[in-house]
Amino acid sequence: MALPAHDATTLFEVPFASAMSDLDLALLERTLNLSLRPDAKKDPRPASLGFARLDRDSGLFLEPGADEGQWMLHARTWGHPAPESVHEWHVVAAGGAHMLDPTVTPPERLKASSPEVAFRPLGHAANKRLSRFRRRMGGLSE
């Protein structure tokens, strides 16, 4: 069951210009994993040419713009995706649009940060602690 667009939250939009030839459609289809409407190549002016699922509650839609040759990649969600995921989707969508329209500037990728990891003893210390726990559980030690 398709959810109504008016209940969705817009995550981002990527406007671009393209003649939207068969080759352009194929490139977007492969790059963004779009599922194109069956009649998209015959009638390139429907409300949405294609759709790519971003997560369980989000999607990327290829839509015609206001003028001939203008297009929009429109990301919507009906859920609450992580900001990092939304940013990565935006980078990928803008990169796909940039392949067809060099004036599109993809946003910078976020710098990967190393997560804080709690210190855990390794090797002999970890085995010693685990062996004491096993003996205690087995009733072999106090």
Image (tube, rainbow, N blue to C red):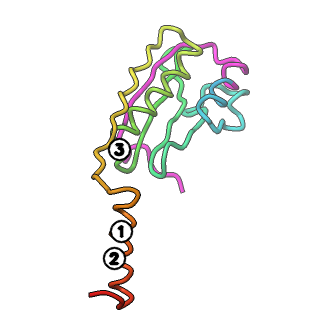
Q: Between 50 and 29, which is closer to the camera in this rendering?
A: 29
Q: Which residue is pictured at 33% across the width and 57% down the height?
A: 121
Q: CA distance from mark 1 to mark 3?
A: 40 Å
Q: Label 3 is placed on what type of residue?
A: Ala
To which residue does mark 3 refer? Answer: 82
- Which structural element holds mark 1? helix
Above or below: residue 63 compared with residue 21: below
For label 2, the crowd category at 10 Å Cα-Cα, with few meaning under 14, some 14 to 19 and many 20 or more, is some
Task: State the residue lying farthest toward the bottom.
Answer: 139
Q: Position of residue 45 (x, y in %)?
A: 60, 26
Q: Label 1 is placed on what type of residue?
A: Lys
- Which structural element holds mark 3? loop
To which residue does mark 1 refer? Answer: 128
Q: Label 2 is placed on what type of residue?
A: Arg
Q: Position of residue 124 (x, y in %)?
A: 39, 61
Q: Between 51 and 124, which is closer to the camera in this rendering?
A: 124
Q: Position of residue 112 (x, y in %)?
A: 37, 32
Above or below: residue 22 compared with residue 103: below
Above or below: residue 33 compared with residue 97: below
